[in-house]
Structure formats: structure tokens, C-alpha cells
């Protein structure tokens, strides 16, 4: 029914088909917020300490039984394996081929054994993780059938920025000596320095930092930094004012809010978040979305006090042993 072959770089024809597939899936899934594959991952290759592998899954057009029916790409799996053999997988099926057994057939054929010599499927991955955003029913059925456990959860919260349900954005008093800078484009070299400095002081585990680095590499938007009187950067908020439709409203996202250990609990995070929400509102967004770790009590408390409401829960699934907490 399906055919597939791992490769370190997609052939031009396959690459174009996969790019079209992830584009169609992103458009189809935008309202629901399901997992998506960034086009930059489709064209990515190995980089320092990370092995990148692509798996285009093909089938006869319309799953025809005719031998002369052309093969087309119906699904795509993207895998990154770090120097420790820890693999992060992303998987997407073309909207026209969902609920037709593509994912189930793939897992039945390649399995989920990461203990063999050479790791999973010879990729070098001795453990696997994959995030299922909005916890699609198909991912729940698939993981339940093959005994794949969820090891972490993530919440999406939303807040009204305009209209009758919008709470006011009150000004926040900053600690003495702390100031907020102007919003700068994510690609600004000075922003990169701010991000690196704050991440160094934030005590993130490597998996979290690597995932954020991937998000920054592929992302867009603006960053506001918080600095202290000594000239050190103690926090930043990254937001993307690009508006999309969510819950039939114009929405935009707060992508990340990171503080140094010393800045936590002093109101810096709230001030940064208010600045980001003001910018999104001024760009025309009716609601703002943010993802948080429900185990981060400080983040949960801050967002609740700022009138955010929980909307979605996401799941991280894992096969094999992994020594770090999940990143997202």
C-alpha cells in the first residue's frame, strides 16, 4: 500500500511534493491548531551535533489498486537525532489521505523498536519523542494501539484583546533599575545576543534550549528585552503579530517568554507579557494565544491573573529512555 525510503536530503521532485503537502496540511489544520511541519525543516540538512533524516511516504494516487496509477507523496516524517541518539520526530499526512490507514500502516511496518543495533530503523535514534499539538484524535488512537505513552503535557491559553470579553491591560511596575527596550525584529543581530544571554541565565535543560533555537531559526516576529541597571539582559518576550484565524477571530501569538533565574517573581515577566499583548492588539489581533507548561506554577499563576483561559492540551509521546524533560 505504501513505500518509503530514508534520505538525508530530499530529491527535488520529492521535496516539491513534500513542501506542497506540508503547505496543504498547515492550511487545513490552521483553525484546529494541529501539529505542523515548517517548510524550513523539509529543506534542512545535518548541522552541528544533529543528524537530519527525511522519510517521504508514497502510495498510488487515491490509493488505487491499479499498477499504472502514479505514486504520490501522501505523508512525511521528519527526524532529528542529536549526538546522544535522542530523536525528535514530526509526522504529517496529506489532508486528502487522512483516516485511510496511512499512519497505522507505517507504524506496523517500521515498528517502534529503538533497542536494535543502529537504533530505530538504523537512524541512530535510541529514543524518540514527538509532540501532538491539540492532541488529534488520530494520534490518541495510534499511540494507544501501539502502547506509546505520553510523558508531558502542554496547554494553549487564549486571552481576548478587544471586544466585550477583553480585560484591560494594566501597566505593571518594574523592579528598580529594570527597563524594557523597544520591540526589534527577531532577525536583528542585537536580538540574538539578548536571547543568548538570557538563555544562559535561565537554567534551561539542553533539550529545551535546542528546541527554542529551532523555533528562533525558523520563526518570525519581534522581541522585547528587559535589562537591569548593570547592563545585563534579564528577560525577553518573543511575539509574532502576523494575524491568523482562530475560533473565528483574528488571532496572534506570544511565542516565548524567558527570564533569568534572578528576574523571576519580580513582575518582569508580567511587564514583558503586557508589552507583547499591547503590540498584538495594536496590530489588529482580537485574541492572543500562548503555550505554557502546566507544571510551571509561576507561568500558570501569571497567565490566570492576566485573564488567560485554557483552551487546548497538547501531548508529548515517547519511546525509549530519555534523560531530560520534554521541550516544546
Image (tube, helix red, strand yellow):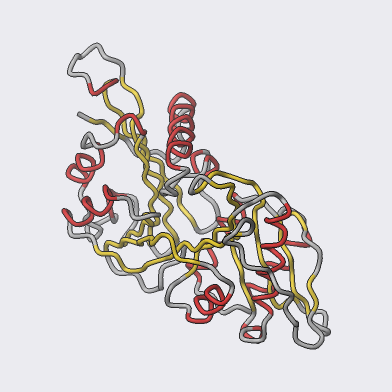
- Residue 147 visible in this rendered orientation of the protein: yes
Name which quarter of the figure residue 76 lies in.
Answer: top left
Q: Quadrant of residue 109?
A: top left
The spot of residue 69 in percent (x, y) is 26, 14
Residue 72: where, in percent of width, then height? Answer: 34, 24
Residue 255 locus on image (x, y percent): 59, 59
Front position in the image: 176 or 49: 176
Q: How many marks?
A: 0
Instruction: Judge left or right: residue 205 versus residue 122.
Output: right
Quadrant of the frame with the N terminus: top left
Q: Is residue 253 above or below residue 45?
A: below
Q: Is residue 276 left or right of residue 214?
A: right
Q: Residue at x 32, y 34 (%)?
A: 57
Q: Nearer the viewer, residue 274 or 176?
A: 274
Q: Is residue 196 visible?
A: no
Q: Position of residue 140 (x, y in %)?
A: 25, 54
Is residue 270 positioned above or below 37 on the image? below
For image coordinates 52% across by 61% down, the residue present is 158
Viewer-nearest residue: 166 or 25: 166
Please give the name of the residue rendered at 24% of the width and 57% of the height, measured from the top-left corner.
117
Q: Residue furthest front?
A: 164
Q: Residue at x 21, y 37 (%)?
A: 101
Residue 94 falls left or right of residue 278: left
Position of 230 relative to 212 (above/below): below
Furthest residue in direction top, as rendered: 68
Amino acid at each position: 500500500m505504501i513505500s518509503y525510503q530514508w534520505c538525508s536530503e530530499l530529491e527535488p521532485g520529492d521535496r516539491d511534493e513534500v513542501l506542497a503537502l506540508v503547505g496543504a496540511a498547515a492550511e487545513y489544520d490552521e483553525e484546529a491548531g494541529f501539529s505542523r511541519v515548517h517548510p524550513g525543516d523539509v529543506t534542512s540538512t545535518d548541522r552541528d551535533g544533529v543528524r537530519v533524516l527525511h522519510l517521504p511516504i508514497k502510495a498510488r494516487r487515491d490509493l488505487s489498486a491499479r499498477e499504472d496509477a502514479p505514486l504520490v507523496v501522501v505523508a512525511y516524517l521528519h527526524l532529528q537525532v542529536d549526538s546522544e541518539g535522542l530523536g525528535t520526530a514530526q509526522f504529517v499526512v496529506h489532508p486528502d489521505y487522512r483516516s485511510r490507514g496511512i499512519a497505522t500502516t507505517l507504524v506496523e511496518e517500521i515498528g517502534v523498536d529503538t533497542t536494535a543495533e543502529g537504533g530505530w530503523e538504523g537512524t541512530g535514534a535510541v529514543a524518540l519523542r514527538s509532540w501532538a499539538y491539540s492532541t488529534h484524535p488520530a494520534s490518541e488512537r495510534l499511540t494507544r494501539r501501539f502502547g506509546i505513552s505520553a510523558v508531558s503535557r502542554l496547554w494553549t491559553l487564549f486571552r481576548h484583546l478587544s471586544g466585550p470579553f477583553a480585560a484591560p491591560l494594566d501597566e505593571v511596575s518594574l523592579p528598580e533599575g529594570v527597563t524594557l527596550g523597544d520591540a526589534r525584529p527577531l532577525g536583528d543581530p542585537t536580538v540574538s545576543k539578548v536571547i543568548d544571554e538570557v538563555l544562559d541565565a535561565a537554567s534551561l535543560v539542553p533539550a529545551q534550549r535546542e528546541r527554542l533555537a529551532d523555533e528562533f531559526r525558523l520563526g518570525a516576529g519581534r522581541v522585547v528585552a528587559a535589562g537591569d541597571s548593570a547592563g545585563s539582559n534579564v528577560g525577553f518576550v518573543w511575539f509574532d503579530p502576523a494575524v491568523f484565524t482562530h475560533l473565528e477571530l483574528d488571532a496572534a501569538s506570544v511565542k516565548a517568554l524567558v527570564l533569568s533565574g534572578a528576574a523571576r517573581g519580580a513582575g518582569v515577566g508580567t511587564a514583558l507579557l503586557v508589552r507583547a499583548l499591547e503590540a498584538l492588539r495594536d496590530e489588529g489581533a482580537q485574541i492572543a494565544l500562548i503555550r505554557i507548561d502546566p507544571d510551571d506554577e509561576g507561568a500558570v499563576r501569571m497567565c490566570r491573573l492576566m485573564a488567560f483561559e485554557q483552551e487546548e492540551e497538547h501531548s508529548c509521546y515517547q519511546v525509549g529512555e530519555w534523560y531530560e524533560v520534554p521541550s516544546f
